[in-house]
Amino acid sequence: WLVGLLRAVGGAVVDGDGEEDPADADAALEFVVEDPAAKVKGPLLSGVKETVDALGVGKEEAAKALGVTRDAERDLRSIEIAAESRELCQKADNRSVRHVTLRLPEGASKYRAGDHLEVLPNNDPGLVATALSVLELEEATPVVWDRIKATRSNRSVRDTDGSLRGALPVMRITAKLVLEWIPDLTAVPNRKSIGRLARAVKDESIRERLQSLSTDQDKYKQEVVTPSVSLAELLQSCAGKLSLSIGELCALAKPLAPRYYSVSSSPEGAADPRLVTVSVGQVEFQTGTGRTHHGLASTMLGSLSAGSCVPGCVRQLTGNFHVPDDPLAPMIMVGPGTGIAPMMGFLQERQSRLKKGQKLGHAILFFGCRKCNEDYIYRDELAAFLESGALTELHVAFSREGPQKVYVQDLIFEHRASCWRLLQQHSAAIFVCGDARAMAPDVRRAFQRVAQECGGKSEAKAASMLGAMVENGRYLEDVWAS
């Protein structure tokens, strides 16, 4: 959200690859440790909610000062954790998925089942402590964020008459808050960033090593990329021998990027339509350096207590990945693992329609997990949907239950007669959510086989049929790279 305001006022930021904008030479001046003698006015912001609220006002000020129109709907806002997260897996020591409930702020646009929750994660407290130590700063050290410098760093904006200075006063935030939310301390720095870090090192041997990593691509790949050396680890290796400001660190680091989660709820029929839930798989693995990496967003969402706040918003999808308007339209849903998330929202919406007395079309869900007593998430909820009629058929694939691995695509072909019967109806739609690399292509091939086997179509005509469904918004995917 801080980086978002820089963009809103035309400021220079580091892009997703860590490369510099043309005006990046000025970026290091945007965050400067406050000079006590300067007597900077304004409160010292140290919390998420107060800072997000202040930034909302700041973006409005920036837009007015620059004479531009901004889309407030795209702002990250302060979202409250409404309840303690709960574990969905039966054996969380093997795999953990947390059910997280959040409450959207008043005035937020109404979301729909099938939308995404966008959240900005923060750096791990241990990594923040490391960075503070290396920079020789205290948590509460005031840092001045000079928004006019951010604006000036874009050469297309000039404050010739000083009007922007009055419209965009500086903001005061703690060093801890800056390091929590601006630089991605877990990211692997690129060679240019390592070169910039090298110039700030006072020790000749360390400086030469970093310079070598920044200029030798093979060495960089072998010693940095392959073992996943993080920026925090590089900083730690320079501790006591580094002359680097907090602004320079933010300028050379990749910015923390938002994460997206498929919403697993529906506001339809809900007692509180502002409540939104997500199903968050906990990410943990060991890097080549021996460091245990914890996913920033998954760890944050899974561990925050009720009443805590995160910067985020609901992103409404532009496609048709929503429950069909026609309640009689058949639905075939495929969602292994956390890919079941939007399907849970769809089923809640169908449940709401049932309570209103509406008749529903046939709905099939293909879910997949490893073992029945290990990671069969939402088992009880799915049973209740079956009993109520919100869900007509449920088929679960267990990939580690027996000697033979079974996946959702296998069950699709096994139940091809039911699938083909629904696909004969022009209003029927297929929804697929989950892994884009292997699962999604395999599922599409499975439906193509269904068309060949049950419809007597050639391979080419079956592929054409699926392609037409995609074009007509009847074959929809919400997939991601794993």
Image: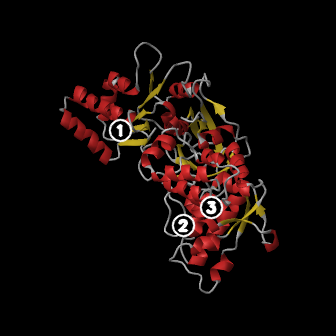
Under tag 1, what secondary structure? loop
Horizontally, residue 265 falls left or right of residue 468, namely: right
Please, is residue 229 above or below residue 29 in the view?
above
Q: Tell me which label, 2 or 1, sits earlier in the chain.
A: 2
Residue 163: image x %, image y %?
64, 83
Identify residue for label 2.
Answer: 24
Identify residue for label 1.
Answer: 428
Amino acid carrying mark 1 in the image = Ala
Q: Nearer the viewer, mark 2 or mark 1?
A: 2
Amino acid carrying mark 2 in the image = Asp
Q: Residue 24's image quarter?
A: bottom right
| Towards the viewer: 243 or 79 | 243
- What residue is at 22 percent from the left and 29 percent from the top? 452
Residue 174: image x %, image y %?
74, 58
Under tag 3, what secondary structure? helix
Q: Is residue 105 in sight in this rendering?
A: no
Q: Residues within 10 Å of mark 3 (few under 14, many from 20)?
A: many
Identify residue for label 3.
Answer: 248
Q: Are marks 3 and 2 in contact (CB under 8 Å)?
A: no
Q: Tell me which label, 3 or 2, sits earlier in the chain.
A: 2
Q: Quarter of the image containing the N terminus?
A: bottom right
Amino acid carrying mark 3 in the image = Glu
